[in-house]
Amino acid sequence: MKNFMTLILCTIAFAGCANNSVKDDPLASFHASKPASILVLPVVNKSVDVMAGSSVLTTLPQLLGERGYYVFPVHTVKTLLEMEGLYEAQRVHEQPVETLASLFGADAILYVTVHSWTSKYVLIQTTTEVDLEYIITNRVGEPLYQRRQKLRYTPDSGQSNSLLDQLIVSAISAAVERADPQYIPLTREANARAFITTSNPLPPGPYSLSYEKYYATPKAD
């Protein structure tokens, strides 16, 4: 009886350690999957700017490639999806994950949604905002990584001894930002924060020089 109780206690303790390990490692599913390739789907654009989706797609592949992953060429992806009758990003996102993964032979799929992509002009100040959501799943739809970034940019009008001069400079800065909003720099920053500078960033891929060292290091006690 004593041996039986000891066995039960050991089993409970082991289960507790396993649960703690999973809890301590927020990227446990990603580490178990270790994807080598990422399929970046067309971006679902919920903003009123029709260029938002394509602008996001111009900034992501290089970042993911530099992180050590093979990224399927976005133009090739778009063409193949259209050959399958999938022209709208929302319809693509609604397709079974297994279907999309098998179509391209991808290990992981990245879904990006633009929630906001605006440049607001109020009085003599223009503020540009982006709100992007990123979700990576494995080839059977299990979530591996998820982040959301909301960034805004307001031009700095600088300092001036004259209130009138400051108002003029602010008005000019606002007009420039309104004419040419800093969407791309903001999007690049959002991408970097989502995958690199965030806590628990995207692990390096197999084509990264730090891949072997990263996975040789224990991720949780």
Image: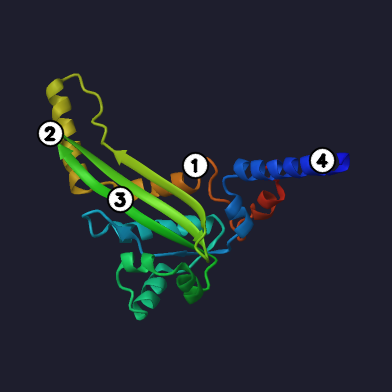
Q: Position of residue 108 (x, y in %)?
A: 52, 63
Going by the picture, which residue comes out furthest to the front? 1
Numbered mark located on residue 76 in the image: none
Q: Disc 1 designates what residue?
A: 198
Q: Disc 2 designates what residue?
A: 123
Q: Disc 3 designates what residue?
A: 115
Q: Disc 4 designates what residue?
A: 5
Other residues around mark 2 within 10 Å, as few (<14) / some (14–19) / many (≥20):
few
Q: Is 47 rendered above or below residue 76?
A: above
Quadrant containing the N terminus is top right
Say if residue 54 shows up in the picture: yes
Other residues around mark 1 within 10 Å, as few (<14) / some (14–19) / many (≥20):
few
Q: Position of residue 35 (x, y in %)?
A: 58, 61
Select label 3 or label 2 by which is in front: 3
Query: Of the residues shown, which amino acid type is indicated by label 3?
Result: His
Q: Mark 4 or mark 3, which has the lower sequence index?
A: 4
Query: Of the residues shown, which amino acid type is indicated by label 4?
Result: Met
Select label 1 or label 3 by which is in front: 3
How far apart, in angstroms, are the residues tagged by discs 2 and 4? Answer: 74 Å
How far apart, in angstroms, are the residues tagged by discs 1 and 2? Answer: 34 Å
Q: Residue at 55% across / 66% down in the picture? A: 107
Q: Residue at 28% across / 43% down in the picture? A: 129
- Is label 1 in a helix, a strand or a loop? loop
